[in-house]
Amino acid sequence: MQNIIYSRSNVGKSSLIKALFSLAPEVEVRVSKKPGHTKKMNFFKVGKHFTVVDMPGYGYRAPEDFVDMVETYLKERRNLKRTFLLVDSVVGIQKTDNIAIEMCEEFALPYVVNCINKIDKSSKGHLLKQVLQIQKFVNTKTQGCFPQLFPVSAVTFSGIHLLRCFIASVTGNLD
Ligand code: GDP
């Protein structure tokens, strides 16, 4: 059973995965030394329970074989439980995010445009504006997207616990 974390490069996928597993030292999470340089898919196995996949970032600095690699994977992987699209709270949904959202809709994947990362970098007013905009987008423009947003910060850990609980719940591990 797999969960995918997916975003433009540099939005903080690797950092988020590291934050999610900060209480599980047995799961070794590597964050590329150069920020925004995840070029391959990285798999983090959580015992027998589930695996989290760190996808290469799309948009700026995307690897050349990105479309072949990611599209094929999303289309053909049968044990995908959830795809999490991570959006940067400072800039909101970008053009390239829309392409990723269309891909999730087209392949009818259960996904969440949930993760709004770097909330520590936005002022409260700006964050509220972004959250409301993204919520409106999810409500009016998507079919398969989970309605709840998860604003998080991989730096301050704000919102991380709720996201952990959500992942535990959708993978059937919340006892
Ligand atoms: P990836 O390409 O999506 O895997 O992004 P990285 O995890 O490499 O993060 C890109 C950059 O954003 C790094 O410099 C991180 O330190 C920074 N970053 C990631 N998450 C956060 C966050 O929640 N808050 C802040 N302020 N910076 C973050």
Image (spheres, rainbow, N blue to C red):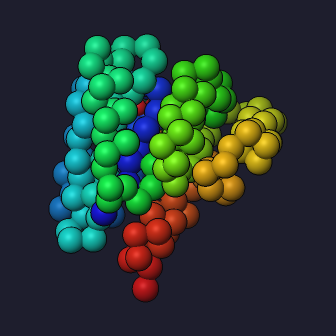
Towards the viewer: 151 or 69: 69
Query: Which residue occupies 45% across, 18% down?
Result: 59
Q: Quadrant of residue 21?
A: bottom left
The answer to whether one can see residue 16 in this image is no
x and y percentages locating residue 156 in the rendered image: 51, 47
144 vs 21, nearest the viewer: 144
- Decide which of 107, 152 is in the foreground and name it: 107
Q: Residue at x 31, y 40 (%)?
A: 73
Nearest to the observer: residue 102 or residue 5 = 102
Counting from the top left corner in percent of width and height, residue 39 is at 26, 25
Examine the rendering and report whether any part of residue 40 can be seen.
yes
Q: How many marks?
A: 0
| Point 43% across, 14% down: residue | 60
Residue with the most extreme bottom position: 175
Q: Image quadrant of ligand 1?
A: top left
- Residue 161 placement (x, y as % from top left): 50, 63
Establish if 50 lies above or below 155: below
Residue drawn 43% across the image and 85% down it: 175
Specify whether 47 is left or right of 58: left
Quadrant hosting residue 136:
top right
**Is residue 106 shown above or below 174?**
above
Q: Is residue 171 above or below residue 58?
A: below
Quarter of the picture holding the N terminus? bottom left
Q: Taking 21 as reference, is 83 left or right?
A: right
User: Where residue 8 sits in the image (x, y, percent)?
Assistant: 47, 26
* 120 lies left or right of 78: right
